[in-house]
Image: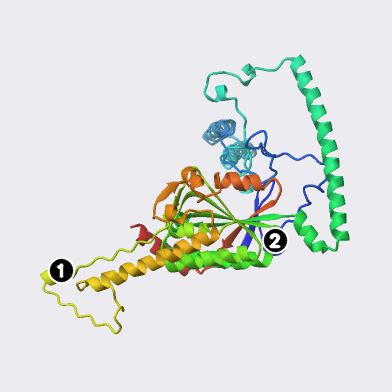
Amino acid sequence: MHLVARACSRHRHRRLPFAQLPSVSAKALCTASKRHAEPAESLDQPIPLTPRVILEDQTPPSKKGPIAGALCLTAAIPLWGWNHAEWATSVAMAYGVDAAAGALALAGIGTIAATLGRDRGGKSAATGKKKFKLVPFDVQRGLLTEPGDEPALTPAVEKLLKEAAEKEEGKAKKDRKAQLEAAIADVSKSLHDGVPAKRVRQRLLPKVYVIRFSTEESRAQVGTGVDLHARLREQVAQLLTIATPFDEVVLLLSSPGGAVGTYGLSSMELSRLVSAGVKLTVAIDTVAASGGYMMASVADHIVAAPFAMVGSIGVIATVPNVSKTLERGGVEVLQRTAGNYKRTVNVAVPNTAEGIAKFEEELETIHASFKEWVGARRPQLDLERVCTGEVWLAKNALALGLVDEVMTADAYVRSRSSDATVLVLESTKSKQSPLAVLAERLVSIKHKA
């Protein structure tokens, strides 16, 4: 699997190899050129520069092209009919009328095809570009007949606003100049103190690497061979080669948990980032329970959406027993073990009190290790209170110390984009033969059925 970074650029999302990651000037050292940016979540937040959000075009298709094409076709058909009905017409005349009719027909067909081949925003569909149209709310709802009916500010108010905007721009220029001078002084001091230029550059150009671990994604891609734990291991290995102590890794986590071994391994993989001095933030939008929270607890910072389910620090094991059913059917099952506890609970033979007791002891051992893992990484927790297997909404988990901030993943990444370059680490699909692709599709269809 080859990993690439997807840069959330100003204009569109571009996929670049790691060797060609975009380099941007430091925010404090950037030029004073104006840039259009998204509005911040609130007035007191800094306006982020990236990422840009690409939306679907909502512009209705134009009707002028098809109408013009239909008129051309309508004019061409009578010309052909009139010409071939008059057999006495000279050959030159016949060819001339045919040429005129053919030209009109081709013009009509071309106009219709060109119009239908263009996307709804007026751009060619082959370019992949999308346009937007701002429509006043009342016009969209059909309450106003023309956009000109929208209210306008008086000239006096416009003048006041313009003067205020000019003052604000002048103040902003002074602030940018002061920031630039301070940044230059800071860089000079760092270099004078012997800090390597490479480290100074890394501090001035921090990056935020975004990775995803979602069991919802895995279920949606049944049959595609997506192994979340294997992919996470490869992503961590890649990040350890490019991330610096000034960077941050954001894990978008969604998991209700699973097998102890696999989630324990993934938790250890994430701890490699923390041990390397790279800040790790886990963002939870839906659920991080049991093994999912084991992974989240590794992070330096945990954010969760208000109604995300968090917790379930416990262990569960379910083993059905069909021995009585087999006995009624006359089926005898022979089972022998070497070692007293090779098999504690059984499926096909009756369970013993000693085996069940040992099984419960093993569950308690795993639970104790789970509690120790979480407590070592979040010492502020009251383990006896939160390690009961209960699940809490994020807004309640905040009071218990299970999360550090209530916020959606998108909001957090967007807030970080104001002072760092945000890069999404994704895996690219290797080229497969047509036979392999067909086999995967057949497996997917079988699972869906």
Residue at position x 65%, y 56% in the image: 248
Which of 294/207 is in front? 294
Residue at position x 34%, y 69% in the image: 361
Q: Is residue 286 visible?
A: yes
Q: Amino acid at mark 1?
A: Lys
Q: Is residue 430 visible?
A: no
**Which corner quadrant of the image does residue 65 belong to?**
top right
Q: Which residue is mark 1?
A: 324
Horizontal relation, residue 176 to residue 240: left or right:
right
Quick check: 2 above or below 178?
below
* Neighbourhood count class around disc 2 (C-alpha, 10 Å): few under 14, some 14–19, many 20 upward: some
Tally of numbered discs = 2
Residue at position x 52%, y 21% in the image: 142
Q: Residue furthest bottom?
A: 338
Which tag, 1 or 2, sits closer to the chain's start?
Answer: 2
Q: Which residue is mark 2?
A: 245
Quick check: 366 above or below 155?
below
Horizontal relation, residue 397 to residue 175: left or right:
left
**Secondary structure beneath label 2:** loop
Q: Disc number at residue 235?
A: none
Horizontal relation, residue 94 to residue 420: left or right:
left
Residue at position x 77%, y 14% in the image: 156
The image shows residue 312 at horizontal and vertical percentages of 41, 55
Q: Amino acid at mark 2?
A: Pro
Which of 393/369 is in front? 369
The image shows residue 380 at horizontal and vertical percentages of 53, 53
The image shows residue 256 at horizontal and vertical percentages of 42, 55
The image shows residue 27 at horizontal and vertical percentages of 77, 47
**Secondary structure beneath label 1:** helix
Which of 204/353 is in front? 353
State the quadrant of the N terminus.
Answer: bottom right
In three-dimensional space, the C-alpha distance between marks 1 and 2, rounded to whole angstroms, equals 60 Å
